[in-house]
Image: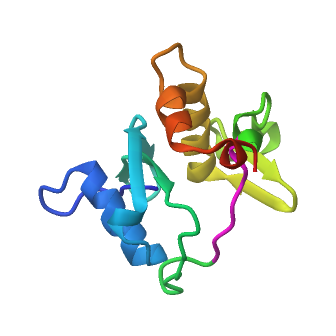
Amino acid sequence: MESKRPQTAEIPVTTALREVTEELGVGPLSVSVVGRLPDVRQELNRFVIAPVVGVLAGETRIAMDLEEIVAVFSVPLATIVSPGAVVLDGEFTKVRGKPMYVLQHGERRIWGLTARIIKSFVEEWNAPAPSLRDVLLRHLTVQERYA
């Protein structure tokens, strides 16, 4: 979940839950918030994103707001955290003049701000205990960990 700059005095978790409700039609009771990642700056639009990590309740139905997002797809957790999954894209880095990361999943190429957030997630996942990984794994079944 991404938490854009909070409206008024909202805290990042409240903002993230509001955004997931608006964009995906998922109510806050269907999300178990397990942690926060460091803020990420999006220079072009001057956003500060406050990433929030959450787990959806099993079989949560998604109802996209097509005016907010184009598509929804999933990437298995095991794919995201596998060594070398998120890589520096040398060619794109040259073009943009700053480090640009990418996660390739099948025909999906995840890049830009989303890839930077995923990279931050992987760094937190690999941090020494106690870590986000430990908290997150308590919320997932064995099947969900590797699906």
Q: Would residue 130 be counted in the magenta stretch?
A: no
Residue located 40% across and 51% down the image = 32
Residue projecting furthest to the bottom: 66
Is 134 above or below relative to 52? above
- Nearest the viewer among 95 and 133 is 133
The percent coordinates of residue 113 (x first, y second) are 56, 50
Please tell me which residue lies in front, 91 or 134. 134
On screen, 109 above or below 67?
above
How many numbered marks appear? 0
Q: Is residue 138 left or right of residue 144?
A: left
- Residue 3 against residue 60 in the figure, above or below: above
Along the horizontal axis of the image, is 66 left or right of 90?
A: left
Measuring from the top left, give residue 84's x and y in whole percent.
Answer: 80, 30
Q: In the rendered image, is residue 84 in sight?
A: yes
For the stretch drawn in magenta, the main secondary structure is loop
Q: Position of residue 80 (x, y in %)?
A: 71, 41
Report which quarter residue 8 is drawn in: bottom left
Q: In terms of depth relative to the viewer, which is nearer, 62 or 30?
A: 30
In this picture, residue 83 sits left or right of residue 125? right
Furthest-top residue in this view: 128
Is residue 75 on the magenta stretch? yes
**Picture coordinates of residue 45 (x, y %)?**
42, 59
User: Which residue is pictured at 49% across the width and 86% down the height?
Assistant: 67
Q: Please give the name of the residue rendered at 37% of the width and 67% of the height, measured from the top-left corner.
A: 19
Q: Is residue 21 above or below residue 106?
A: below
**Residue at 41% over, 67% down:** 20
| Residue extent of the magenta highlight | 71-77
User: Is residue 95 visible to the viewer in this orientation of the structure?
Assistant: no
